[in-house]
Image (cartoon, rainbow, N blue to C red):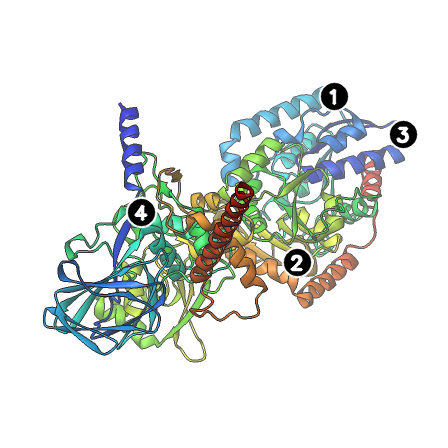
């Protein structure tokens, strides 16, 4: 069978790669065409477009890049028509994928969305369209079960979180420690999108400059490019004195050896939690985008970090917008590094999250669901 | 056209960067009714009007007592009455000399260099220290900053020297260069710490200049609280090198944070009565009771924060307002100490402890300013003895006695060390001469 898979971000790329392997395990004749990154390339060859050209987040940013976004949608539709897949599988990246999936459904191609958009938080209006145009929705967070049951979406299935298998499958992490430098490692995860990195990395650099007792290491992504990281770091006058190290595409290696972490909100908060690393979560976006998001979300949710959402408690401290400033970051950093009771409380929260996420196998369950869908006609 | 101007400016900067002696008014914040002066090191000659020598070689164990009599100064030495004069001058007779000044109504201080005393009338003495410029700078550094690392003293010496050279005529009309108070720069004693002197010596000839080569204003403050202030937000002029910068190095220091509790009535009445603000308006009331500053702001409901700082005697303008729900009092949660413009001393101390170089620290706080080095600057009279000063610092580190006294003062030890070496050199030369003589005789 032919599978057309679209991932728009680094995390989607990783899940996409695992999904390709799982589909191939169940369907040895499987053919793939995809939009994705390096991980999917290793699994299935050349992409139609690489994710480095796609990552845009927030209302203002999308508006600024509207022509590019619309151009990509048009390209994607033409490519699908030409290749005629049995199923179009969008991984996360809902702004782009839901449009393509609707279009595919209307053209008689099975439409699958893997990793549900956060409808329980905002854009609940999308439910109607998803009910009509999606043939399968594979969601990954345990608390979403209740939401989809209550909102009558029978095509929605819970497959478990793909991160659990990604982390469980991590073998022999490369040792980042050196005999000359035995300082505890602090992982800095400034996000995967350029806007996120630009907004969060300068704060992290200033924090690092003030704490030579720790070894700060940035989890860089090669698709963003060293130039962008270096430029962002050097924009701070402090950087001349002490710049943190950067390792590329080694986030899991880094987290597996980190004593604590500063994490820009996103999937990385859950990854950090699953590696049992105490963290401060921070996010600073375009104020207009955030204001619009807040107006849409209202009081429905209390958290933005995935670990907090899954446990429905304050497992980690979230510093958002104005609260994400040098002073608060410094205070919270002290708490996750020197306050043993606070660290233990956070680790206990992570253990609850792990229990709620359950076993590995999300990719296998998703692959089975997709194949069953196609076979059912 | 720009190049000749730049060259002229640089030449001017070089010329103005040199200084020999300066006159500093001592005890400028006090009315000095009489003063007892003794000699801690070396000898002094006492002159009166028109270089009339009254006493020579005044040393340890003798004291000069001066008190105003109308427009003149009454002089006595060890209870011997010498009459009254328009002014008296204590002039050092040795290379290194220290005077101990003990006014009737102030704490005792010591100074190097010469002393010129006259009467201001109304029963007050005008006491001027005529002192080598670099010795003055070292005294200022000791008065203005705390710490233990040479680079922090070097930094303070550079900004104090730059300020002094730019403002050396501040009190010209009154017959001296600087006062010893914060109006100019604090100069509350001679430098009694050899490590501070070493920092000052290392910075000899170093000043901060702007892109045209002109000396810059170098304001500093105790602690920025995490962010410095733009010059125009505190004073009038917007200077390109005094820009607000993020300063996380000022966190976790002595003066990083402060709290002040004010009764709710006093706080609200201040805005209502002094600034005619309608506190019955709920929006205004809410602003007054929940004002916050993520970054430094300039006003609170149009009232300059600098004014509020003065009126409530706050440590800084960088504060947020909350209300204590239990007492209903207004609680100001503040950051930093001082006006916030230019260099944060505690931030600089932290940066030095992190191994950041002194020129990087200066460029962090003074945006775009560059370090200028005048190779012809007078380095001060102890600069030839850096090795010996370092030796004394090492001896002090290993010493159990940490209390400073005139017997263990570094300056006396330095010159005793120098004299001993000179004597040894003379002895060796004499021995060699004797040997030659003997060979000749034989």
CA distance separating discs 3 and 1: 19 Å
Query: Closer to the camera: disc 4 or disc 2?
Result: 4
CA distance separating discs 2 and 1: 42 Å
Q: Chain of mark 2?
A: A
Name which residue lies at 52% across and 48% down: B434
Compared across the picture, whether A360 is left or right of A82 comes to right
In-front residue for pair B356/A24: B356
Circle 4 sits on which residue?
Answer: B217
CA distance separating discs 2 and 3: 39 Å
Name the image quarter holding the N terminus of chain A. Answer: top right
Q: Are marks 2 and 1 in contact (CB under 8 Å)?
A: no
Query: Closer to the camera: disc 2 or disc 3?
Result: 2
Q: Chain of mark 3?
A: A
| Mark before the other along the chain sequence, 2 or 3 | 3
Circle 2 sits on which residue?
Answer: A308
The reply to the same-chain question for discs 1 and 4 is: no
The correct choice, above or below, for B218 with respect to B75 in the image is above
Compared across the picture, whether B54 is left or right of B190 comes to left
Residue neighbourhood size for the residue with mark 3, other residues' Cα within 10 Å, grouped as few (<14), some (14–19), many (≥20): few
């Amino acid at each position: 069978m032919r599978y057309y898979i679209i991932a728009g971000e680094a995390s989607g790329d990783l899940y996409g790669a695992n999904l390709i392997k799982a589909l191939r395990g169940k369907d040895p004749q499987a053919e793939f065409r995809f939009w994705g990154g390096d991980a999917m390339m290793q699994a299935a060859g050349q992409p139609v477009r690489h994710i480095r050209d796609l990552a845009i987040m927030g209302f203002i940013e999308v508006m600024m890049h509207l022509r590019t976004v619309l151009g990509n949608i048009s390209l994607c539709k033409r490519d699908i028509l030409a290749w005629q897949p049995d199923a179009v599988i969008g991984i996360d990246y809902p702004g782009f994928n839901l449009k393509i999936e609707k279009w595919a459904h209307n053209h008689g191609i099975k439409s699958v969305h893997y990793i549900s958009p956060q409808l329980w938080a905002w854009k609940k209006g999308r439910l109607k369209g998803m009910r009509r145009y999606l043939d399968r929705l594979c969601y990954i967070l345990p608390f979403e079960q209740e939401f989809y049951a209550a909102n009558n979406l029978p095509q929605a299935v819970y497959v478990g979180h793909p991160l659990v298998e990604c982390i469980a499958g991590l073998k022999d992490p490369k040792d980042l420690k050196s005999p000359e430098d035995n300082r505890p490692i602090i992982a800095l995860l400034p996000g995967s999108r350029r806007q996120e990195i630009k907004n969060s990395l300068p704060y992290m650099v200033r924090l690092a400059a003030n704490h030579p007792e720790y070894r700060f290491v940035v989890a860089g992504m090669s698709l963003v490019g060293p130039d962008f990281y270096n430029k962002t770091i050097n924009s701070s006058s402090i950087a001349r004195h002490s710049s943190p190290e950067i390792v590329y595409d080694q986030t899991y290696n880094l987290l597996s050896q980190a004593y604590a972490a500063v994490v820009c909100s996103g999937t990385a908060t859950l990854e950090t939690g699953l590696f049992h690393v105490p963290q401060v979560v921070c996010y600073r976006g375009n104020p207009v985008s955030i204001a619009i998001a807040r107006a849409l979300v209202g009081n429905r949710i209390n958290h933005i970090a995935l670990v907090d959402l899954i446990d429905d408690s304050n497992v980690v401290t979230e510093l958002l917008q104005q609260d994400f400033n040098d002073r608060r970051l410094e205070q919270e950093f002290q708490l996750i590094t020197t306050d043993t009771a606070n660290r233990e409380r956070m680790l206990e929260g992570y253990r609850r999250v792990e229990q709620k996420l359950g076993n590995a196998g999300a990719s296998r369950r998703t692959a089975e669901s997709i194949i069953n869908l196609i076979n059912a006609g | 056209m720009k190049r000749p101007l730049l060259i002229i400016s640089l030449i001017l900067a070089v010329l103005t960067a040199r200084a020999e002696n300066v006159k500093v008014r001592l005890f400028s914040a006090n009315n000095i009714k009489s003063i007892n002066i003794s000699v801690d090191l070396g000898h002094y000659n006492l002159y009166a009007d028109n270089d009339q020598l009254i006493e020579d070689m005044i040393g340890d164990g003798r004291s000069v007592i001066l008190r105003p009599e109308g427009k003149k100064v009454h002089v006595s030495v060890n209870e011997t009455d010498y009459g009254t004069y328009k002014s008296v001058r204590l002039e050092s007779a040795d290379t290194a000399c220290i005077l101990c000044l003990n006014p009737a109504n102030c704490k005792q201080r010591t100074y190097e260099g010469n002393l010129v005393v006259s009467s201001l009338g109304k029963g007050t003495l005008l006491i001027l220290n005529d002192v080598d410029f670099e010795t003055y700078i070292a005294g200022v550094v000791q008065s203005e900053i705390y710490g233990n690392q040479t680079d922090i003293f070097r930094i303070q010496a550079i900004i104090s020297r730059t300020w002094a050279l730019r403002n050396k005529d501040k009190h010209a009309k009154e017959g001296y260069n600087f006062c010893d108070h914060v109006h100019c720069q604090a100069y509350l004693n001679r430098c009694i710490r050899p490590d501070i002197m070493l920092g000052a010596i290392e910075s000899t000839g170093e000043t901060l200049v702007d892109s045209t080569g002109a000396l810059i204003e170098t304001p500093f403050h105790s602690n920025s609280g995490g962010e410095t202030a733009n010059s125009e937000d505190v004073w009038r002029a917007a200077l390109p090198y005094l820009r607000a910068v993020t300063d996380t190095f000022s966190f976790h220091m002595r003066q990083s944070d402060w709290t002040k509790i004010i009764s709710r009535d006093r706080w609200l009445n201040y805005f209502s009565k002094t600034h005619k603000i309608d506190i019955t308006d709920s929006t205004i009331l809410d602003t007054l009771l929940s004002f916050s500053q993520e970054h430094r702001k300039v006003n609170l409901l149009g009232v300059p924060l600098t004014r509020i700082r003065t009126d409530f005697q706050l440590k800084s303008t960088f504060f947020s307002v909350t209300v204590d729900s239990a007492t209903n009092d207004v609680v100001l949660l503040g950051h930093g100490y001082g006006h916030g413009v230019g260099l944060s001393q505690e931030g600089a101390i932290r940066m030095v402890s992190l191994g950041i170089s002194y020129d990087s620290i200066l460029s962090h706080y003074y945006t775009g300013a560059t370090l200028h080095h005048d190779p012809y600057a007078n380095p001060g009279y102890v600069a030839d003895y850096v090795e010996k000063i370092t030796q004394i610092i090492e001896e002090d580190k290993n010493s159990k006695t940490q209390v400073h006294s005139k017997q263990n003062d570094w300056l006396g030890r330095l010159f005793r060390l120098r004299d001993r070496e000179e004597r040894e050199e003379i002895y060796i030369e004499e021995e060699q001469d004797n040997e030659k003589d003997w060979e000749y005789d034989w």
